[in-house]
Each structure stands twice: as C-alpha cells, then as structure tokens.
Amino acid sequence: MVKSLDDKIFNGIVYVILGICGLAAILPMLYVISVSITPFGEVLRNGGFILFPREITFTAYRTLLTESNIPKAFQITVLITVIGTAVNLILTGLMAYPLSRKNLPARKFFLLMIVFTLLFSGGIIPTYLVVKSMGLLDSIWAMILPNAVWSFNVLIMKSFFEGLPEELFESARMDGAKEFRILLQIVIPLSIPVLLTVGLFYLVGHWNEFFQAIFYVTDRTLFPLQVIVREILMQSQQPLENAENMMPTQTMQMASVMIASLPIIVIYPFLQKHFTKGMLLGSIKG
Amino acid sequence: MQANRSYITTARIQPARQTKLHSVLRTVWRFRAFYIMLLPGVIYFIIFRYFPMYGVIIAFKDFSIMDGITGSAWANPWYKHFQDFYQSPYFSQLLTNTLLISCYKLIFGTFPPILLALLLNECRIRWLKSIVQTFTYLPHFLSWVIIFGILLTLLSQNGGLVNRLIVDAGGQSIPFLTSTDYFRSILVGSEVWQNLGWGAIIYLAAMASIDPTLYEAAKVDGASRLRMIWHISLPGIQSIIVLLFILKLGHLLDAGFDQIYILYNIQVYPVADILDTWVYRTGLQQLNFSLASAVGLFKSLIGLILVLGANRLAKKWGGGIW
C-alpha cells in the first residue's frame, strides 16, 4: 500500500498530538520526582526547571521516614487498605452472587434497595450521626465500614456472575453441593478477572482514603497517609520569611507526595488491563 | 351468635392463609443459603445507607446532640432551616458556584476525551498507542491530595515552577491558587487533566465496535482520513456521546466535593465554595447540624429529580443506567 503525502502529514499530526497528550499526563509526575530528589539549593539555582537532576539526594525521604508522622500514617493506610479491601470483597461477593440468580424470590426488592442508594443519600451529616451513634468515631473502622459496599461494584459483579454458564451450577447442585460450596469452589475460581477488577477499585479507594478520615477521625495517630501529606502540603501556603529554614521545603513536600503515590504508580502498569476492563464492565447497564 | 359467626369465618379463611404463608416460608427456606449470603450486605445497607435517610429528618428539627434524632424538638415552622438558608446570602453564591463549576467541567471536560479517543483510534503505531494510553490513564488513580501537591509545585506563588519562570522573565508572580481569578480555571483544568485518558476508554471501545467494512468502502471511494473520522467514527460514537452527556447532566449539583475541598482555601471561597463544602463546614465544623442537613437534603432532592429526568431523557437515546 502506497501512502500518499496527505496520509503522511495526517499521521504526523496525529502522532505529535498524541505525544503531547502522553507527555502532559506524565511530565508533572516526573517533575515531582525530580524535585523530591534534588537538593533544594539546586532547585532554586536552576530557576526551578529540572527534569534530570544533576545531584541526587534522598535526605528528604530520610527525614520524612525518621522524623515525621509519615511512617505511622503509612502503617494506618496499609492496615485500612488490607482489612478494608477484604471486607469489601467479601460483602460485595456475598451480595452479588444471590442477586445474580434470576429465580431468587424478592430479587427485585434487594436490587432496588441497592440502586436507590445510587440516586439518593441521607447526606454527610446524618451519616456522621449514624457513625457516631455506632461508636465508631476515632477508630480504624470508621474509615472502613461506612463505605463497605459500593453499590456500583455489586452491580458490576452481579452482571459478571450472570454471564457464567448455568449448567455448571445445575450439575454441581445435582451432585449435592450446597450454595456456599458452589460460590467458593465454582463461582470464585471462574470470576478471578472481575474480583481483581473490583478489588483494585476498592484498593485504590482505600489507598487514597481522605474524607472518611477527616469526617470521623480526630485522633492524629489514626490519620492515614493522604491526610498527613495534605498537612505537609498546606504548610507552604503560609508566606515564608526565611527560605533557608523553610521546613518542610518543597523537596520535602514532593517527597511526601511520592511516598503517598508510589505504591499506586508501581502496581498500576501491571494492572492497567484490569482497571480498563472494569471501566467497560461498569458501563454495561446493570 | 356474633362470636360464633366470626369464628366460623376465620376458620374458613385460615387454611388458605396458612398454606400461603406456608409456601412463602417454604420458598424462603429453600433459598435460605442465598438469604444468609445477602444478610451482611443488607444489614450494611440498612445501617449506613438507610438510617441516614431517616436521620435526614433533623433538617426539620432543632437538633441537639443531647436529645438525639428522635428526642430533638421539631423546628417551628417546619421549613425554618430551609427558609434560613434561602434567605441567607450564601444561597445564591453557593448555587451559582456549584452550577458554574459543574457546567464548566461539563463543557470543557466532554470534548478532550473524545478527541483523544479519535486520535488513538487513528494511531497506526502500536507501541505509541499503548504508551499514550498507559500515561494518560494514570492520573485517574492519583488522589486529589497528590494532584494538589503537583499543582503546588507548579503553580504556588513562592517556589512554583511557573512563577519562577515568570519572575525570571522579569514579571510579577501570580497567586494562581489563592486568586479568585484563576481558581475555577484550575479546578476545571486539573479535572480535565485527571480524566482525559480515562474518559477516552469508553469512546475507544465504542469505536472498536464500528463495522470495519465501512472504512474499507470509504477508502475505495477515495475518502480522506479526516472525512472518515467525520462520517464514520464520529457518527459511530454519537449516541454514546449524547448518552454520557445526558447522564452527566443528572449530576449537575455534584461539582466535585473531593477536589474542591482539597484544593480550595479561604481566599477563594467566593468563587469556589459549593453546596457540599458549605454543608461540611457548617455541619461538622460549626456543628450546625440541622441547617447543614437541610441544605444537604435540598441538594439530594434536586439531585434525585435531575438524575431521574436525565435517565428518562437517556432512555429516549437508547439506554439509561438501569
């Protein structure tokens, strides 16, 4: 196939714009990395424009990891993420499986119960009062339970389960398998893709946890990573008098941003496929 | 005699009732494993989703922590808190901000992902396509705190990259993040940046399902690539563009609480304070529970009407969300 000149020009334009989009998405992150590992004096000398630092220092990271709340907050976030994702997946799976069985009596009622919460909510204040009356304020559980099931994820999982071949269940039932065994030994092994997708959405949600923490937690030792990082970032908002003793410096701030986003960035390339699949599963009408 | 007759009637009805109840119970028993599975989730929904819906009645009460939801006295008149809000100077400011920010996001956020999807669809170099996809999807997974950090290092007045360049060029530094002139643009810009790639996924999938023979036929007829985009790709995703746009209209009152709360500061309240952020501050920081709930309820109700309306409209275009 011979390419015409028009075609070449067209391709050129497409590639240039795509390149710009790609760079626009990734450059800010690279800049953050550079700033976080460059001595602050160097940053100022270069008018702040550094993408490939000539001098590298990890002092900012060392200081954050030894002298700040970051390690504690990191632990809390990991704890919330692990326990939270487990609770999410168990509850979501246990709801989605029965609801995927078309012959379940009152199925419509339960589905409506879930879908309605997508349309209407009591709002921040009444939810706060419920969490308070449950005695959950200032505990890890305040950041896990109020969002233990995302209605949308139930619908995603349910529609995946509906696509599993009915014969499998029938033959298992003929062999006398109970529903819990069918769920554990047939449904779950066949549903790894959707479990992974939904699990990842929950996981990222917990890692980025911010609002439930500021709503329900006042005990500083329970603050997750994002809350602590925001505090570190807010300190720059005040005008600085002497740049020399500015603590935390911009270097330090960007190092904290990196610590909070690194786990997501590291797992992301390997899991991108599953995230994308989830986006498309989600767009299937429940 | 009277008693006797009623005894007879109940005796006649009872067997029928009993069998009905019996059969219901039998079905429930047959499906008991399923109901046991549903139980934890249902309890969750009742406690954390439906109790708050009941709790919303404090919008009509003068709530005090001591008396609790049921014990607090009713507001007099019942619409007192709604009236207070309506008559306060916040009402028009909050509503304006919410709708403006939302509309800007809707307008400026709709087209870039479509454009990116079209370009990705035209991209003939596979590695370039997958790299651009990988890079542009990433921001979707970064929290607003992280994005706030990125914005600070780029735009802050002391030490932000852009301002250092401006100052080096002999200009005056600009307080991007604390200025009412720039703040809404920053909100819209950062949202577009975050969702550029992620928003394109759905259009890409829609384009993948366009019949390839259409393109081949057009090529035989000598159509240029641009014409093919205009006459094949775009019409192919037209319905999904309209559908998504309508569904987003349903969330017009959700201007982005997470983003705005993390990015804003007291200097930009006049242009950035939306219903949700005000509810949070009034309720949980100033402990004015009833007033905040009233405003929250006001927002939820209008939101409900908008979503239902949008969904009805969407159905005409071939599909709602349920």
Image: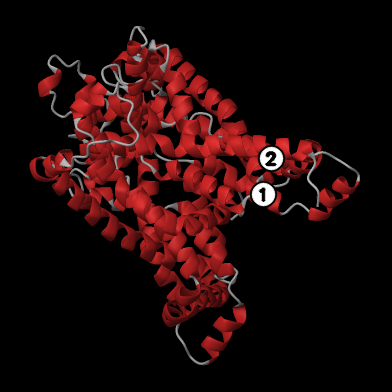
Q: Are marks 2 and 1 in contact (CB under 8 Å)?
A: yes
Q: Residue furthest right?
A: B221
Q: Are marks 2 and 1 on the same chain?
A: no
Q: Is residue A206 left or right of residue B1?
A: left
The answer, for residue B247, to whether it is visible in the render is no
Mark 1: which amino acid? Arg
Where residue B60 sits in the image (x, y, percent)?
36, 28
Q: Residues within 10 Å of mark 1 (few under 14, many from 20)?
A: few
* SS at circle 2: helix
Q: Is residue B286 left or right of residue B90?
A: left
Q: Which residue, given by chain and number where applicable, does mark 1 sit on?
A: B124
Residue A238, placed above or below residue A202: above
Q: Which residue, given by chain and number where applicable, does mark 2 sit on?
A: A11
Q: B84 or B89, which is in the foreground?
A: B89
Q: Residue at x 61, y 50 (%)?
A: B322
Identify the disc placed on residue B208: none
Q: B86 or A96, which is in the foreground?
A: A96
Q: Residue at x 55, y 81 (%)?
A: A169
User: Mark 1 falls within which chain?
Assistant: B
Q: Residue at x 55, y 24 (%)?
A: B103
User: Mark 2 falls within which chain?
Assistant: A
Q: Residue at x 76, y 45 (%)?
A: B236
Residue B256, placed above or below residue A217: above
* SS at circle 1: loop
Where residue B26 sits in the image (x, y, percent)?
50, 79
The answer, for residue A284, to whether it is visible in the render is yes
Q: Is residue A218 left or right of residue B283?
A: left
Mark 2: which amino acid? Asn
Q: Residue furthest bottom?
A: A175
Where residue A108 sits in the image (x, y, percent)?
56, 60
